[in-house]
Structures are given as structure tokens and as C-alpha cells.
Image: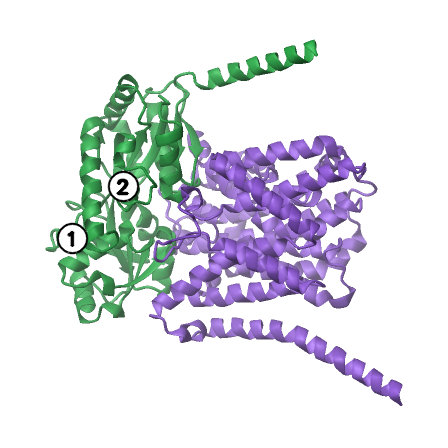
Chain colours: A purple, B green
Amino acid sequence: METLNFLLQGFGVALTPSNLAIALIGTLIGTVVGLLPGLGPINGVAILIPVAFAFGLPPESALILLAAVYLGCEYGGRISSILLNIPGEAATLMTCLDGYPMARQGRAGVALSLSAWSSFLGAFIATCGMVLFAPMLADWAIAFGPAEYFALMVLAIVALAGMAGDKPMKTLVAALLGLFLSCVGIDANSGVYRFTFDSIHVADGIQFVVLVLGLFSVSEILLLLEKTHHGHKAIQATGRMLFNLDEARRVFLLNLRCGIGGFIVGVLPGAGGTLASALAYSTEKRLAGADGRFGKGDLRGLAAPETAIGASCCGAMVPMLTLGVPGSGTTAVMIGALTLYNITPGPLLFQNEPELVWGLIASLFVANLMLLVLNVPMIKLFTRILAVPNWALAPAIAIVTAIGVYAVHATTFDLLLMVAVGILGYAMRKLDFPLSPLLLGFILGGHMEQNLRRALSISSGELDILWSSGIAQGTWALVALMLALPLLRIWRRRAARRAAAAALAE
Amino acid sequence: MGPSIRRALLAAAALLLCSARAAEPHAAECIVPAASGGGFDLVCKLAREALQEAGLTRRPLRLAYMPGGVGAVAYNTIAAQRPAEPDTLVTFSSGSLLNIALGKFGRFDESAVRWLAVIGTSYGALAVRADSPYKTLDDLLAALRKDPDSVVIGASGTVGSQDWMQLALLARLAGIDPRELHHVALEGGGEISTALVAGHVQVGSTDISDSMPHLNGGAIRLLVVFAERRLDEPGMAAIPTARELGYDVVWPVLRGLYMGPGVSDADYRRWKDAFDRLLASEDFARLRDRYELFPYALTGEALEAHVRQQVARYREMARDFGLIR
């Protein structure tokens, strides 16, 4: 009951006219920043911190602004994923897989509105989870040490195999290539440079933005040009702009599952939206089994990652508020903002600054609702992008992409690298290699290696640290299950075939 | 043919005009040699806010981000490609100087740029969890002497980084072989405090600005700070310095700005004077406080001399610890 009281107080803070206006501005700015490829929530939040300070906003308003921008960015990131097959940021990678095919089938409006709805549900579930369990979860989240993270990353990589579909060899090659690329740059343990060939430009690794924009954006441009040459017509967004009740009902249970799962992954410090969406997508694909059309425009393939992303970015606030530990890169920047106000996130924050904490939580509800209401009428506008003919679209994407990379990193080297990666991406697409395993391998590989090295350096090289805790053992059990499932399926199919053969022989 | 050429010329002229506008004085640029949101970013933001408040810039500094190689990309860009821009400042920290000493900044050494100003500092420190059995530095050192491998120490950075270096210096003075320390590379103060609170590491080697946000919460406490004297700040005054405990390790983490090597003396002086005036003002002290930095003012030639000396010292240490040959 006490919690409810606090929450009501929080709504009192969030619903003042000025804070409502701030949340509105924040969500709008966030959507635009998220829409631009290369710019993500970290950039949006970092850019706005001094602005908030310059306007002399009180701390709770500043935090509401930053949270609104954060959520807005996650919202905006999906738009380019669905319409152009270019992930606005890492987490929305999985959204491309089924969102883009949907747009190609003329269902862009449905895809956009359904993903907005899913993300809203995910965020709603996570915010409820935050209200109910925040203090409890905090203790559990930090019990995740390097060893547990390593097991979790292995689980994610094994889950990747679920994306393999009918071309396991090509998926494997792409994932391995991604793992290899994650090795480039300075080794965080020993300080040794790996595969940098004495170039300072790759000294701290290949930038994610360069890789993602090269692989998806540049190769997309090349494909577009090719199509223009062959006289293809641009696809039209036809029909409904909104999903219907039947579609919402079909994914509702999935929304709940992925929302809860995404929230849990989001609470883990450092895991974040990418892991949440990858796990959600591959789990749902497995659950759907043979009747799924995943990768070809399945509603579930779109709803699963979007729900998980929405949930995980709210979940990431739990460790930030309760422990002062960032749950993601963006929340790390937000902690920096709080310290500017001389407010220290941590175990005592709930007691010392209740109106701030509960105001923030309440404003998460408000900002989410706002995003949904704002974005639905704008869908028609967004889908117009599809009506742009290829001869205009390709150079426009090229310009925005190049600006995105240059604005974030300000070196021409990254532009050249992006083009080189783009040519690689084009070749891979032509050869029918899937691109997303490469990117996931790249992201997860770095985390996996880092955590394995940390775990082993904590234990002085003893391997048992990797399965010494209950959490780690549980995760390994899931890994074993994931690995065993396809084998089981093959064995069953063989048994069935043998039975059929036996029946035939008789 | 004719009209299209004319149009192209017109476009070129327009472009030229645009670039001429961009080079107009006082549209000064502050380059953050990292992604947004870190310590380098805060220095640019502090400089921007302070210069603007003091009326020393007509327009606020424009921030540009140029991450790569922990500052190496920006350093090389300024040294080689953009050496003579009169209104371009780049932030650096002691970590940048250490990297120069370790040869991690490519072919350029510390004489490749003009060092402008240091506007504040943080200090290295060792942190433990609030309920740690190590009540004092001596408790910790006694445990380390007995078995250096028994205490897991998290530092933000690799072997040879600042956080590792300060610990190695302390260990050597206490008669412990730095190479036997149980070092785990983490990233940033946030990760260190998480690892401490969760008990994955027992000691964190970090700096105060980085760990300050996690101190007041009461979850971790500092055993020692590597400053010249006790810090004059609520909650910090009770933390002993390494020096007063008998180990002469002082590890300031300077934060400052440099300019290109081709910048004219007049422009260099103009900026130096601006920072001299800024660093002497009361308002700046207040602002710097808010950014969790401690006073440290050094500009112009005095800074250039200090940088040369500091890099030489780092080089010597690195050689001592076998990090470079």
C-alpha cells in the first residue's frame, strides 16, 4: 500500500503542466534522434544534459526529460529498421528481420503501429515490474558476476543458432566473422593491440555504428541502385495504417512473455536491449516452430523484439536507481547527469529523494503513453518514405548515413571503412548470407570474451568459477536445453521416418 | 552546357561562403577525443560553461566528438591534419600523457601539440566495500604481503593504465612485486563500484571523480587517496593520503586542453590569457566543484614544461615495470 501511495505522489510530480510539457518535448526530440542512423539514446541524452542544466530545470524535471528522450530514441530507432532495413541502433537489429519484409509486402503501417503497441506494452510491463520489485531485483542483479555473464552470453550465442533456419553453415560463417571482428582493437586486459596493423583508427576496435551502417545501409544502397537499374518500382504502403484487434490478440501472450523476459534482461547491468531482443526473437521463433514465417514478415517476429526492447530500457533504470549502477550505456550517462545535481543514485535514493524516484517512474508511464499517442498519427507520414523513388532514396540514405558516421566519429577513415564494410555486406547479401548473425556475433562476442577473461582472472585461471554459482548453473542448464532441442527434433523426425519406412515395408 | 557550369560555380561559391563562415573567429571548437558522456566530455562542457559565463567567449564552444584509441585519433588528427586551427581545443588527461609515454599515440610524441591549460584534477584512490575486513591501508598491505594473490583488485584499465600504475607504485614501496598482484581489468568507476558491492573484487583502484557518485550512497568507502594533502571536501577530509601513511605515492589525474602545433603565438596567448583569467575566478571554482574536480591550474609554458617532465617520468616508470623496452 505504501508503494501505491508513493506512486500516486509520483504522478503528482509527473502530471504538473511543466513536467508534462517537458516529457512531450523529450519524446519528440528522442524520436527524431533515434530515427537518424548512427545516433542513439546515448547521444540524445548526452546532448540534452547541458541543455537541461542551462534552463535551470529542477532535478526531477531534468531526469524526466532525459528518460523521455531515452524512450523516444528507442521508439525512433525502429522506424528506419522497418522502412529501410537499416537499424537505427543496435537493439533494433532484430526488428529489421520481420519488420522490413512486412513493409515490402505493403504492411508498413501495420508493422509500425504494431511495433509501437508492442514496445508500449513491454515498457508498461517493465514499469509495473519496477514499481513492484525494484529493491528486490537490485540485489539479484548484481549477483551477476563475470562468470554468470559469460554463461548468459553463451546462451545468447547458442540461441543465435535458432536464427539459422535453412542455412546453418552460412549463419555460422557470418557469426564467426562477427566474433572475429569483435577481437579487433586493444585488448582490455593486457593492453595489447590485436589486428590493428599499427593503425590508430582501429586501436579501440571497429565502431559499431560503422559496421551496422556499412553492412545494412551501404549494402542497401547498392541493392537499391541495382534495382533501379533493372527498372524495379518502389513499393507502396497500401491498406491499413493500424493493426487490427485480431492481430493484437494474436501477439498478446507473446507481448507478456517478452515483456517479462525483456525486463529481467534489462535489469542486468550491461546486458541491455540488444541481448533482450535477440533472446526474445530466437525464443519466440523456437516456440512458433514449423508454423512460423519468421524472417518473412511474421507478426510475432516483429512484436517479440520490440516488446523486449521496450521492457529492457525501462528495466535498465532499476539498477541505476537502486544501486547507482548503470544498466546500460545510456543510464550511465544519466547517472553522470544526476551527479551534476549533487544527487547520488544508490541504495539510499529511494529514501532520500522519493519525489524524484517516483516522479521518474510515474513519468515513464506518462512518456510511454505519450509516445504511443504521438506516433500512431505520424505513421502515415513515416510510410511516405516508401513512396520515394529509388533514384532519390539511395542518395538520401547515402547522405544521412555518411553524416551519421561522420558526426559521431569525425574521421574520414571511418567513412572509408564503412564503404568497405558495405561492399562486404553487398557481397554477402548477394551470396545469401544472413547479416544479423554477424552483427550479433560482433556485439555478443566482445562481451563474452571480456567476461570470460575477467572471470578467469578473478579465479586465477580456475575454470570451476564458470559454473560455481546457482545462477550460472541455471544458465548452463538452459544452454544445454537449447542445444538438445534441435537434436531431439531431428531424432524424432528420424524415428517418424523409420516408422513410416517400416510401415511401408509391411 | 553554359548554364550548368554557371550553376556549378554558384554552388561552389556558396560552399566556399559557408566554409568561410565556419572559420570565423569565436566559433571555437572543443574536441572530445572520446564518445559522449565520459570524463573528456565533462572537461569540454566545463570549459564551455565557464568561458561563456565569464564572458570570455562570444559564442559557446562547439563540442565535437572524435573517439578512437583513447585519444590517439584526435591527437594524430590535430598534429598532422589540422595543426593550425586558431580556435580548436582538444581535451586531454594524465591518461593521455601516459599513453604518449607508452608509445600508444602512434608516431607523435609529447612535443607534437601545444599544451594550453590544465583546469582541474582528480586523484587516484583505493576503494573497498563498506563492510570490508580491510579497515585501513595497512590491513590491506599486510594481507597483500602475506599472499599477493589472495586479494582480487579491480582497476579501470589494462596493465599499464593509470589505475594499475598507482597501485603498482604503492605495492613496490610496500615491498610487494606489482606483477604478483591479482589484477582484473574493469571499465570505469561504475563497473568498479558494482564489482565491489557484489563482491567480485575486494579492492578497486580508481580515481575520486569517478567513484564519488558511488561514495555518498555508503556502499563503498575509500582507504587512501593519492593526493598531496587531505582533500578539503565534506566526506573526503577523513580519508588519509598515501603520503601521510608513509608511502610517497601522489597520483593526480589532470584534466586539460591542448591546441595544434601550427597555432600562432598570438592565438595561443589569447587562449592562455582567457584561461588564466578563468582559473583565477571564484565563479569558476564553484563550477569546477560541481563537475567533481579539484583545483589545479597550470597554463602556457609552465604547463608545457610540466608535460615534458611528466611524460619523462611516466616513461621511466613504464621501463621500470617492464611495460616498454
Quarter placement of the C terminus of chain A:
bottom right
Q: How many marks?
A: 2
Task: Locate residue A262: give its quadrant.
Answer: bottom right
Select label 1 or label 2 by which is in front.
2
Residue identified by numbered label 2 = B97
Marked residue nearer the N-terminal end (1 or 2) = 2
Look at the image and tell me whether residue A159 can be seen: yes
Give coordinates of residue B178: x percent, y percent: 22, 61
Task: Locate residue A173: give its quadrant.
Answer: bottom right
- Indicate the secondary structure of the residue bearing disc 1: loop
Q: Residues within 10 Å of mark 2 (few under 14, many from 20)?
A: many
What kind of residue is marked 1? Ala
Task: Locate residue B87: give its quadrant.
Answer: top left
Label 1, label 2: how many angstroms apart (C-alpha)? Answer: 23 Å
The circle on residue A463 is none
Look at the image and tell me whether residue A373 can be seen: no
Residue shown at 16% from the left, 51% from the top = B249
Give coordinates of residue A423: x percent, y percent: 62, 44
Where is A172 relative to A11, above or below?
below
Residue shown at 35% from the left, 42% from the top = A342
The circle on residue B242 is 1
- Which is more toward the observer, A434 or A277? A434
Where is B298 relative to A134, above or below?
above
